[in-house]
């Protein structure tokens, strides 16, 4: 058996940062302690005998526990083809420690792992547990991970869809982070009403999970960067991220932001989604947030060519026989939060959306499909 190293409190910056080869001696997986070799055996068992989510976890564990100091991560492919990027394992450890410090996560805290382990969010939950010494329960990444689970947890990460379907169980969570897609106004309002200590996260594979978080309070707060991150903007007003601890240098995003100071910003939307309608630049994500007070999760905003406006805003929906289209159109037109330019000029219905493996909507691929019907508003 490989000797285990007792971890110290990482909040004391004078303490040595743990090495990626070390597994905290208080780390528990589904209630059991494993050393280095024991964890390898678990990974092998997951790969050979586990469900799909366990096989993903097993494959990642085998890569993490090998002799290399680097690991390959795959981007989600939301806006482009997925890419494989090589990262230093120690950078992922640094990311885990930064999250632990920000959220005051302590040795022995209980955490729930309910995200796919084939993408960065799921991988980082496991690394946080191994490095910080958490008791981690691994469950299938279903819509409601709390199904038949009455345990209480100190720290949980979820997608917006999971949080929406778990509202009645979130009193079992001390701290909740929500990421992978934007948080709708409706979901945030429910979390505030239930007094859930919830945060929306901002990050991507290239930043090794989140680099900024936003408390879900009313009125809405801004994103605040974690201590290891510095930010700036390019000429498009898009966010640039730097973090020596993550080996991230001058990472230029396509996310337009409003910079409030050197470590706080408000997210406006992706510049490659911008719609120019009658000379007015519109961000689909901003319109989607406003529509979230009316609509469910299955929609997005796009545009079509228009002889007068240049581009006109359109609403993309999944066909639903129970949907009252006339009432929906009236609600949209009567919405006090939408400007005249933001009100969709048509609704386009599709059988389903094209999605990435992690469940994110692929807008361009969806729009390339044949629609079921189009309603002009």
Image (cartoon, helix red, strand yellow):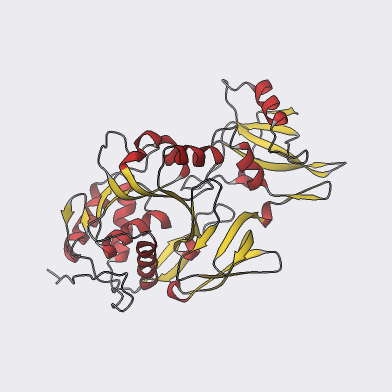
Q: Is residue 84 visible?
A: no
Residue extending farthest right: 308
Residue depicted at 32% across the width and 61% down the height: 128
Q: Nearer the viewer, residue 26 or 142?
A: 26
Residue extending farthest left: 1
> Can you give x and y, in whole percent of width and height, for residue 297 in the image?
54, 36
Q: Quadrant of the N terminus?
A: bottom left
Q: Is residue 318 visible?
A: yes
> Can you give x and y, in whole percent of width and height, for residue 218 in the image?
53, 45
Residue depicted at 64% across the width and 54% down the height: 268
Counting every numbered tag in the picture gives 0
Above or below, 289 relative to 125: above
Residue extending farthest front: 219
Q: Nearer the viewer, residue 190 or 21?
A: 190
> Can you give x and y, in whole percent of width and height, for residue 146 in the image?
32, 38
Q: Nearer the viewer, residue 31 or 265?
A: 265
Residue 10 is drawn in which quadrant? Answer: bottom left
> Can you give x and y, in whole percent of width and height, for residue 373 in the image?
68, 27
Q: In the visual, does 64 lie left or right of 120?
A: left
Residue 120 is drawn in which quadrant? Answer: bottom left
Q: Quadrant of the C terminus?
A: top right
Residue 39 is drawn in which quadrant? Answer: bottom left
């Amino acid at each position: 058996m490989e000797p285990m190293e007792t971890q110290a409190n990482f909040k004391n910056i004078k303490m040595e940062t743990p090495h990626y080869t070390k597994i905290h001696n208080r780390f528990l997986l589904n209630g059991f302690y494993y050393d280095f070799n024991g964890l390898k055996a678990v990974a092998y068992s997951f790969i050979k005998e586990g469900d799909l989510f366990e096989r993903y976890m097993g494959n990642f564990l085998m890569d993490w526990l090998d002799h290399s100091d680097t690991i390959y991560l795959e981007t989600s492919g939301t806006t482009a083809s997925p890419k494989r990027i090589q990262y230093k394992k120690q950078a992922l450890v640094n990311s885990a420690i930064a999250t632990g410090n920000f959220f005051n996560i302590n040795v022995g805290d209980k955490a729930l792992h309910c995200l796919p382990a084939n993408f960065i969010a799921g991988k980082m939950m496991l690394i946080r547990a191994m490095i910080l010494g958490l008791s981690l329960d691994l469950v299938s990444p279903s819509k409601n991970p709390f199904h038949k689970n009455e345990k209480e947890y100190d720290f949980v990460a979820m997608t917006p869809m999971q949080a929406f379907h778990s509202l009645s169980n979130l009193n079992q969570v001390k701290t909740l982070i929500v990421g992978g897609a934007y948080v709708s106004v409706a979901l945030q309002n429910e979390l505030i009403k239930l007094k859930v200590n919830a945060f929306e996260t901002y990050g991507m594979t290239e930043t090794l999970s989140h680099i900024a978080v936003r408390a879900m309070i009313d009125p809405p707060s801004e994103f605040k960067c974690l201590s290891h991150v510095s930010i700036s903007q390019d000429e498009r007003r898009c966010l640039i991220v730097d973090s020596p601890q993550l080996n991230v240098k001058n990472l230029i995003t396509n996310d337009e932001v409003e910079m409030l100071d050197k470590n706080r910003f408000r997210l406006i939307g992706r510049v490659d989604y911008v719609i120019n309608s009658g000379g007015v630049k519109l961000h689909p994500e901003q319109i989607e947030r406003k529509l979230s007070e009316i609509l469910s999760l299955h929609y997005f905003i796009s545009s079509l060519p228009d002889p007068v406006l240049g581009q006109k805003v359109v609403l993309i929906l999944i066909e639903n026989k129970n949907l009252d289209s006339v009432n929906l159109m009236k609600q949209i037109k009567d919405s006090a939060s939408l400007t005249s330019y933001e009100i969709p000029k048509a609704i386009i219905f599709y059988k389903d959306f094209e999605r990435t493996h992690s469940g994110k909507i692929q807008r361009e691929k969806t729009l390339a499909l044949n629609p079921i019907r189009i309603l002009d508003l």
